[in-house]
Image (cartoon, helix red, strand yellow):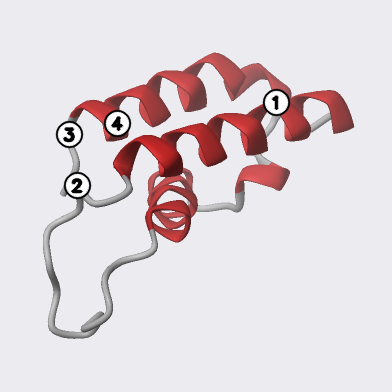
Amino acid sequence: MTEENRRKLWTLIKEAGDYLRGQLPEHPNHPKGRNPYAHVALAVKEKFNITYKDIPDNKLDEVIKYIEFLKENPS
């Protein structure tokens, strides 16, 4: 992925994390609350089987749509 696209995705991940702050359900492994930024980054990694930095440029739109899905469906 190009550096420009990596930065764009990281910005979207941060914005999604800001949006999800306080919306993620409680979990016994996270007694002080869940990290929404890590949640989004990990969800992207699990969906695409690769870190957001290593996703090919041709999948950029798909990743953006998935991040929007995560914002609409906190879980």
* Amino acid type indicated by mark 2: Gln
- Badge 3 crowding class, 10 Å Cα cut-off, few under 14, some 14 to 19, many 20 or more, is few
Residue 20 position, x and y percent, is: 31, 42
Q: Residue at x 38, y 54 (%)?
A: 36
Helix, strand or loop for disc 2:
loop
Q: Residue at x 53, y 38 (%)?
A: 13
* Amino acid type indicated by mark 3: Asn
- In depth, the one of 39 and 52 nearer the eye is 39
Alpha carbons under labels 1 and 4: distance apart: 16 Å
Indicate whether 35 appears above or below 2: below
Specify the label residue 38 is tagged with: none
Relative to 38, 56 lies left or right: right
* Quadrant in the picture for the N terminus: top right
Indicate whether 75 appears above or below 38: above
* Amino acid type indicated by mark 1: Lys
Specify the label residue 23 is tagged with: 2
The residue pinned by badge 4 equals 71
- Badge 4 crowding class, 10 Å Cα cut-off, few under 14, some 14 to 19, many 20 or more, is some
Alpha carbons under labels 3 and 2: distance apart: 10 Å
The residue pinned by badge 3 equals 73
Alpha carbons under labels 3 and 4: distance apart: 6 Å
Helix, strand or loop for disc 4:
helix
